[in-house]
Image (cartoon, coloured by chain):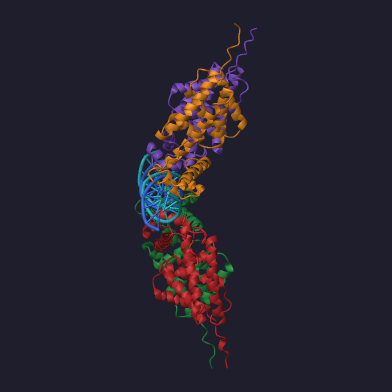
Chain colours: A red, B green, C orange, D purple, E blue, F cyan
DNA sequence: GATGAATGAGACTTCATTCAT
DNA sequence: AATGAATGAAGTCTCATTCAT
């Protein structure tokens, strides 16, 4: 998604130099890595160094540090939305939903500032982020809907609650880090809370 | 708690000037407020201004910005531990446990950076924080134990999971902010997951 | 004037592409406009954009920003010299002289940085500017000479003083801007000072 | 005039450290010198170096480069106003007026960016400069008035024209620089234009 | 002990200039 | 020839920390 911005109309001509595109991607990748490792206060120079480029190049592609951060967020959100979309064709809706949830959280555990991105998705601070955030919410909503229809997830929770839980779980994973098993068990608790209680098995 | 460090034992001779103590407290208070409002990147000057003191004074009491942040965290953790302790004498152990959990999260929604403090408590990054972190874990553990004994909280979760959930819930509250009702419902999901399922009532 | 530098003599073989010439002119025009609007600190990119060309092209024609500025100055000076030349054939020498003076000043009030160009002309800082500066001085000198011969301008002022007055008037116009009437009255004072006092008409 | 800003009310207490005041003055002085020599685009670092202080100090006293420039302007304007005031008690009003004019221009010739300051005074761009600009205009107006009453300066010119002429003359002096004699003669022309023509000596 | 001025490293950003396409 | 992406020096400004008063 988010077609890499083309300097001029796709028809007009000049199809945006290939190396420029490559560098933009390199910057984004480096930024993700650096911000993940050192937090979002890491300097733009650090990002440039990691990308093997000059600072000027970074600023050419992202005119502001904020813009760079935003781009990192948007990229992540986009990837998540894509993953969610992919899972829509899975057999078991419940497994798909919980699997997505788990993947996100596990990912967050690798300290990737993912949670920050997610948090933004929930709040939609920036105009630019808005689109991708909406995208993710739509995809996640679909996943949730299917899992609820299938009777795996309780029907009385909405997308907002799910997003909140996802953000919380991700941030906990990112900040507490440490023990994968603890993380798994904590997540299991949340999942138990989300599961639809069987119709009380109507007694005989 | 958090015994105000005394510059020198009362025997030494220097009786620790009262105003110095008062200033230390003022700085701490100001720091909490400022960091809550503007994040931990707020400048030390800002803290000093809020405290009505000079920067020099702030640095006399906390030789480093990091030290100041740590002190803020420690203070928070101490207060939480105290609250937990107070709840130990409550009638209903389950209500006490869930009540504490709720209070913490609600607080986090308001007072920025609480979650960071909590996260540190879970991980025990700093030597200094360790003590107070332990304190909080002990108190929370006791609360949990009572609630489990009373059959309100499922027996198969341990303190680490609870801490993880608490951190996650707090950070979600802090970052998603916004809607209090959504927050409440998300928390309810977590609580449902934590509750001990009644012994299946009934099978014949 | 300002013979568009030809990359190589027409004999050499390379016939100097017409579009290159056109581009050079476009750059110059854009530079004048941009520097007039935003001062000489405007970026070369801005000039390129205004010219509808790439920065590279700008630098191909003017290897340095300084060279570009110089070219702009030279162009202005050249135009002024041409105007002065044209006025040589005017009927009334005095009106021609004062008219030229007025035109220059009025122009300066609008078109920023003219005064800078004039100042340079007076001082002949750059080698390159020298030629055109000389040109202007010659033309202005001729105008002055005629006006003095005609008895309109006092005989005891030389070209240097006139240039100084012209520069001053232009810069004042450019920097004080504002009120056209004030400008006119101030200029009138200068003109009064320049006028030859009638031979005291007098008594014998 | 312009009492050196006191950090707190003059009564309150702490009378503003003496060295701070000294440093502020040093910065101002250095700024004047540096901007005069290298133009207003000279870097703040250069100013700091000249003042023998750290950049931080410069920025502490003048939070912005613009503020620094403004302060330099204001200082100059203030000095000029003071000079004009001093000349009010001179015997010969005409000599006082023309003397002031000459002094200003001669001063400007030492490339001091004075003309820029003057130009601002005429236009009153900034709020802060406004006060001092007004001051200067008042003082100059008084000088002019006296010279007109004394019959030395023609009655039909107003303060605005005088200011314009002063700015122009200063800028010409600053930019054309060079020959002091030329400058003097050019100024003489302006003065001739300003002088009241004797009542035409009605002689019959 | 308290104060706040001084310091200078470092952050973000711009821009003249070079160079691969 | 033209283009515009890349470069990095340099500029403005902030801020943790030190130190004279």
Quadrant of the rendering where the C terminus of chain D is positioned: top right
Q: From the top left corner, tell me how far across and down residue D14 is, in percent.
A: 47, 39
Kindly indicate the quadrant of the structure image that contains residue C88. top right
Residue at 50% from the left image edge and 45% from the top image edge: C26
The correct choice, above or below, for B95 with respect to C174 in the image is below
Depth check: give the residue in front, E9 or B123. Answer: E9
Residue B103 shows in the view: yes
Residue placed farthest to the left in the image? Answer: B12
The correct choice, above or below, for D197 with respect to D164 in the image is above
Depth check: give the residue in front, A201 or B127. Answer: A201
Image mark count = 0
Residue B15 shows in the view: no
Q: From the top left corner, tell me how far across and down residue C199 is, in percent.
A: 58, 12
| Direction from residue B7 to residue B202 in the image, left or right | right
Depth check: give the residue in front, A90 or B174. Answer: A90
Q: From the top left corner, tell me how far across and down residue B167 is, in percent.
A: 46, 68
Q: From the top left corner, tell me how far across and down residue D122 is, in percent.
A: 56, 32
| Direction from residue D53 to residue D200 in the image, left or right | right
The correct choice, above or below, for D100 with respect to B170 in the image is above
Kindly indicate the quadrant of the structure image that contains residue C152. top right
Depth check: give the residue in front, A61 or B70. Answer: A61
């Amino acid at each position: 998604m988010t077609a890499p911005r083309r300097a001029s109309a796709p028809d007009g001509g000049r199809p945006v130099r290939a190396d420029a595109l490559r560098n933009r991607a390199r910057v984004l990748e480096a930024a993700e890595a650096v911000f993940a490792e050192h937090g979002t206060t890491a300097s733009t120079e650090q990002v440039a160094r990691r990308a093997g480029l000059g600072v000027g190049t970074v600023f050419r592609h992202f005119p502001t540090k904020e813009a760079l951060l935003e781009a990192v967020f948007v990229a992540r959100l986009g990837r998540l939305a894509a993953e969610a979309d992919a899972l829509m064709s899975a057999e078991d809706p419940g497994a798909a939903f919980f699997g997505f949830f788990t993947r996100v959280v596990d990912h967050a555990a690798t300290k990737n500032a993912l949670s920050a991105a997610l948090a933004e998705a929930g709040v939609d601070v920036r105009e630019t982020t808005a689109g991708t955030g909406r995208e993710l919410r739509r995809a996640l909503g679909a996943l949730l809907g299917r899992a609820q229809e299938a009777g795996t997830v309780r029907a009385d929770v909405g997308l907002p609650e799910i997003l909140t839980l996802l953000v919380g779980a991700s941030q906990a994973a990112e900040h507490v880090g440490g023990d994968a098993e603890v993380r798994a068990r904590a997540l299991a608790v949340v999942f138990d809370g989300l599961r639809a209680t069987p119709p009380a098995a109507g007694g005989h």
